[in-house]
Amino acid sequence: MRTLLEARLDTRAGNEAIKNGKLPKVLQDVMSQVNPEAAYFAPMDGGRSCLMVFDMQDSSQMPPILEAFFTELEAEVHIQPVMNFEDLQRGLAVLGRT
């Protein structure tokens, strides 16, 4: 299932992760795990944020993917299923509304 992960890093923990070089490693490790179709990094709501869209095969993937954000970066994490336009068209076709 196509999934959107949004992680907003704690400012203090993010500062420390940049100073000690941990931030690039944590992000690279997560990206290697999820192989995102898209990944974006931007300031959101006043803090460093990461947005990734990836295919989650099973909900049991959540702990290994999310724990580094929680434990290493003290991030606030939101995860939700999402659709691209083709997914929406297929869903609407099932309803007979294309």
Image: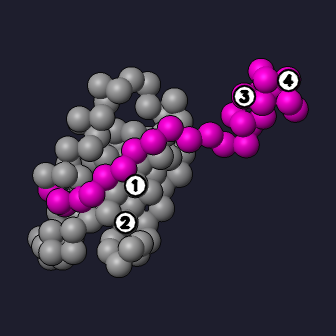
**Which element type, helix, strand or loop, lies under badge 3?**
helix
Tag in front: 4 or 1: 4
Give the residue number, with chain letter if any, for mark 2: 49
Residue 43 is drawn in which quadrant? Answer: bottom left
Q: What's the amino acid at mark 3?
A: Gly
| Mark with earlier residue (3, 1) | 1
Q: Which residue is mark 1?
A: 6
Q: Can you tell which of label 3 and label 1 is closer to the viewer?
A: 3
Q: Earlier in the sequence, mark 4 or mark 1?
A: 1
Badge 3: residue crowd in 10 Å (few <14, some 14–19, many ≥20): some
Question: How far across and down, in percent of the image, does residue 57 sit?
Answer: 43, 25
**N-term-proximal mark, 2 vs 4:** 2
Q: Are marks 2 and 1 in contact (CB under 8 Å)?
A: yes
The foreground one among 8 and 25 is 8
Magenta residues, start to end: 72-98
Residue 84: say if magenta: yes
Residue located 24% across and 59% down the image: 75
Location of mark 4 (residue): 96
**The C terminus - image quarter:** top right
Q: At 72% from the left edge and 28% from the top edge, which residue is drawn?
A: 91
Residue beneath disc 3: 91
Q: Position of residue 44 (x, y in %)?
A: 41, 72
- Along the polypeptide, which appears first: circle 3 or circle 4? 3
What is the distance, in whole Å, between disc 3 and disc 2 at their CAs? 30 Å
Neighbour tally class for label 2: few under 14, some 14-19, many 20 plus, Cα within 10 Å:
many
Question: Is 23 a magenta residue?
Answer: no
Residue appearing at x 79%, y 23% in the figure: 95
Q: Amino acid at mark 2?
A: Ser
Give the Cα distance between marks 3 and 4: 9 Å
Disc 4 marks a residue whose amino acid type is Gly
